[in-house]
Image (spheres, rainbow, N blue to C red):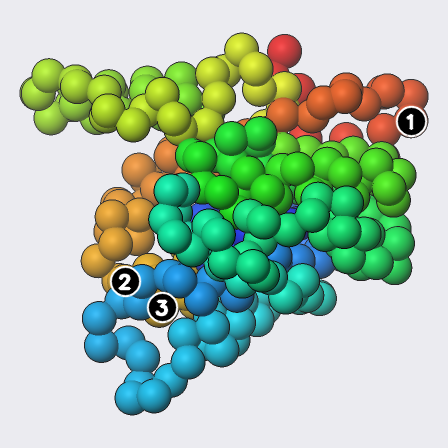
Amino acid sequence: MGTIVSFHAHPDDESITVAGTLARAAATGHRVVLVFATRGELGEPVPGVLAPGENLSVRRAAECHAAAAVIGAERVEFLGYTDSGMMGEAANDAPHCFWRADVDHAARMLSVVLDEEEPDVLTIYDDNGGYGHPDHIQVHRVGKRAGELSAVPVVAQNTTNRDWLTRGMRGMAQEEGREFTPPEDLPEMGKPESEITHRVEAVDFVDRKRAAMRAHASQIAPDHFLLAMPDPVFAMGLGTEFYIVDPPVNPASAPELFDELFTPMR
């Protein structure tokens, strides 16, 4: 069996983005490893969730381990950088934040885990970090470099399928008898379908994905719009996960894990 290492910026990112892929991998006997650049110190906790004096970064790290257990991940690691906040905030200039990290140095830190695990696949984010968050963009840069340093066979960039999302929102609007108005931030979300190379069908694992999201109770309230979705809508919207694999993989040398999980878009 193979190994997949999934690299993320903050706790809860793994559950929202690639939990279906990871749960499917674990369920079929593959080893799953999670690595986080930060502990998400600058997240906004759900009101009333933290106990008096409870440290958010400690809480979020604990939630990572709880979500990992749901997903089936066998190892969780943190690189130790601090959360950079949203783009343009003063936190972007903090000396130890991930956004300011030297890419090669951070990549070497990630490569320690990669060299120990010898993964078949490393998951990161697309070059805009999915939606422009500085730490997510840095995951792309650092992950790509670490994949080169450790000669990982496949580096898969998780992304949102912008056209899939548009079709889904338009269909829901039509069912509700209202006019579809694309969100203003839609051009910043993910990538157009023409740039996406692979998908992972994880509809059978959406219950684990939702449960992993619930494990991050400090960040995702029970009435959060993702958790409040009816089951069929959640399965349709989050049951397929999309990736860009660049450079492409030679079919003759593709790892078994990659062929088993990742379906070409074309």
Q: Quadrant of residue 222?
A: bottom left
What is the residue that sits farthest to the left in this orientation? Answer: 177
Q: Quadrant of residue 186?
A: top left
> Quick check: 161 left or right of 109?
left
Kind of residue at badge 2? Ala
The numbered mark at residue 221 is 2
- Helix or strand or loop: what does disc 1 sit on? helix
- Helix or strand or loop: what does disc 3 sit on? loop
The numbered mark at residue 184 is none
Q: Is residue 142 visible?
A: yes
Q: What residue is disc 3 on?
A: 217
> Quick check: 82 left or right of 223?
right
Work out whether 242 lies above or below 30: above
Quadrant where the C terminus sits is top right
- Report how many numbered discs are placed on residues in the image: 3
Mark toward the viewer: 1 or 2: 2
Q: CA distance from mark 1 to mark 2?
A: 43 Å
Please provide percent x and percent y for residue 198.
63, 24
- Helix or strand or loop: what does disc 2 sit on? loop
Mark toward the viewer: 1 or 3: 3
Kind of residue at badge 1? Ser
Find out whether the residues at labels 2 and 3 contact each other: C-beta distance under 8 Å: yes
Q: CA distance from mark 2 to mark 3?
A: 6 Å
> Quick check: 112 left or right of 170?
right
Between discs 1 and 3, the one toward the N terminus: 3
The numbered mark at residue 253 is 1
